[in-house]
Image: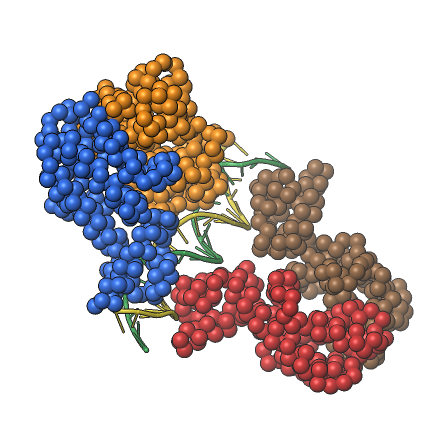
Chain colours: A red, B brown, C blue, D orange, E yellow, F green
Amino acid sequence: MKRGQATKEKIERASIALFLEKGVNGTSVRDIAEACGIAEGTLYRHFHSKEAMIREIFTEHYVAFSQTLAEATAEVEGLEQQVARMVALFCRFYDEDPILFGFLLMVQHRQLERMPAELPNAIDVIHALVARDGRAGDAMLATGSMIGILVRNAIFVRHGRLKGPLSDYVPQLTRQIMGAVTA
Amino acid sequence: MKRGQATKEKIERASIALFLEKGVNGTSVRDIAEACGIAEGTLYRHFHSKEAMIREIFTEHYVAFSQTLAEATAEVEGLEQQVARMVALFCRFYDEDPILFGFLLMVQHRQLERMPAELPNAIDVIHALVARDGRAGDAMLATGSMIGILVRNAIFVRHGRLKGPLSDYVPQLTRQIMGAVTA
Amino acid sequence: MKRGQATKEKIERASIALFLEKGVNGTSVRDIAEACGIAEGTLYRHFHSKEAMIREIFTEHYVAFSQTLAEATAEVEGLEQQVARMVALFCRFYDEDPILFGFLLMVQHRQLERMPAELPNAIDVIHALVARDGRAGDAMLATGSMIGILVRNAIFVRHGRLKGPLSDYVPQLTRQIMGAVTA
Amino acid sequence: MKRGQATKEKIERASIALFLEKGVNGTSVRDIAEACGIAEGTLYRHFHSKEAMIREIFTEHYVAFSQTLAEATAEVEGLEQQVARMVALFCRFYDEDPILFGFLLMVQHRQLERMPAELPNAIDVIHALVARDGRAGDAMLATGSMIGILVRNAIFVRHGRLKGPLSDYVPQLTRQIMGAVTA
DNA sequence: GATGAATGAGCATTCATTCAT
DNA sequence: GATGAATGAATGCTCATTCAT
């Protein structure tokens, strides 16, 4: 039982790193098995298929982040404070595990389409905050801008255009987002 | 010569659409050949390889856009006006060919790494404008925010979260970007 | 001991049904284990291998049937009565367990080749009867016809071409066989 | 074009022999490719899949035989003569290509289920003859007996229990079948 | 006796690319 | 220029079997 769980986690870690580095289609099950030091067939003891594995990893972490985001922003009043919380949370998440973050970003489009609608979804959480505040002309446009600012600068850190950690930019990012949303 | 050129363009159009729909790795040379009504081998008369084809298509359109962006922003003075030009250009480009836009977005990371550094590059163009203006605390961070705002909202239009055309949002996007950069 | 025996029989029943339904190669050890509610490894407590299991099941039932056939036909005199016994026995065997019958039919070619020659064998039993009678021109040809008539009509019942039970046709089958053998 | 057709036929011949010898599941695409002296991928230029290949080969030959059987028996009057034709045709078919015959026999159950009902089917052809004659008590039972006599003795030849060619037994088989049907 | 994770060879199939026609 | 058959390595996945617990 214990051994099985450890192997599953080993597979997850190795997969995420390989997917980010070489792409989902560029990473074979054989690659993953070699990176883990397990046999190919072993992967299928823990995941139904490569595709199911990606979906499982994505859903687990994306839902957990969305849930945390919803709770953290619910604890404070006013868009400024909520945005501050969101930015801090987002940056910490990126800095703590940039590889996981990159993986989630990489597969989000394909996976979000297949995710059950009732699960917590970061985009909807943010949109609700902006809409409740009411200052933004078009809440969805403002939501897009907020997410765009965070995501693109995270990518800039990953690509070396910005010097990390991303958390160093929390105050500036918060100010920029508020500037955009209330423009 | 003319017939050859027509075939080459037919391959480009079909490829871009298929790549966006099913992914680069999810689209086989056979898929492309079938969509074009040509034989598989014919593709290799016009492109050295599938990979070279992608690179060629990307470079051609990305460089052209970056070039246009550089010229359009050079015609006016002041960041406000330059941003207005940039936003209008970006939105028009998206609306005129969302499929091409989606394709460029999809392959940008992988392709930008391989692109010769001396070719015009939209990110550098924008960064130069922001840096010259001087109002933004960190020019690269502001550049990321600008690009993020535009790209993410374009994606929102593509995914149906925002009702298109993207050009309808030019004034708001311009205001939001200026709000972010000068915050 | 008792529990072990019960498990072994459970495995046999489940295997026979699965083999008939999905073929020997189409049925995995995992399929069998799931159908029995046991673990995959448990099967190997009772059988040396999948192949050995098939051989064991086949031999057990085929030999038992051949033995019974030899005994039942030895009790009466004259080919007519012997054929009548044989037909009745065959039909009862089919009707009592069509799944087992189908399984034996399915694997007979492969298994008969590997069966020790000294074990009772239905074909030899029948051939001996026909040869002793002497009326058939070629005893082996007549043996083939007898077996063919029984087996093919059993298959017709299984496939729904004939309405069962097969035992309803005992008199007609007996007459047809005698008609063929003495023609 | 010519080269392609030749390769396809080479694949068919090699497949049939291998399937009969080692079973459908026991024969890998690699086995077939090696036996043909072609690459594995080449097989897929000519057949959509291994399964489709089997279906195609079966249908082609089984339908052709059934068609010939229908025509040959339609040329003469009276069940005796029709049976004589049928037996002669069946034996010739076996003797001319015992390997093909064995293959058709081996896959018939699985393939007949999937064959379009409107295609000629040997069983239905024979059943119609028997039913029209009217002498047999149960036409389907008699049909089963006829087919059983022919098929089982063909198998006996294949297994060496009867010395071939099967055509040597045409008169006796005809007599036996008539004996069975009119018993 | 029972378990089920682990194995690794084997499978059918796909695919970018080549080349004789 | 165009074709499409041929290639063969690579892919995701299955499976009978083993073995530590």
- Image x and y of residue B40, in percent: 57, 42
* Picture quadrant of residue B135: bottom right
The correct choice, above or below, for A72 with respect to C83 in the image is below
- Image x and y of residue D55, in percent: 43, 38
- Image x and y of residue B75, in percent: 88, 63
* Picture quadrant of residue B167: bottom right
The correct choice, above or below, for F6 with respect to D120 in the image is below
Can see residue D170? no
Front-most of residues A78 and C131: C131
Can see residue B117? yes
At x 27%, y 37%, the residue is C151
Question: Is E1 situated left or right of D15 in this image?
Answer: left
Screen quadrant of the N terminus of chain B:
top right
Front-most of residues A144 and C90: C90
Question: Is A70 situated left or right of D83 in this image?
Answer: right
Front-most of residues D80 and C81: C81
Screen quadrant of the C terminus of chain B:
bottom right
Front-most of residues C83 and D10: C83
At x 71%, y 82%, the residue is A74
Total marks in image: 0
At x 64%, y 77%, the residue is A67
- Image x and y of residue A111, in percent: 61, 64
Question: Is D136 situated left or right of A97 in this image?
Answer: left
At x 82%, y 69%, the residue is A138
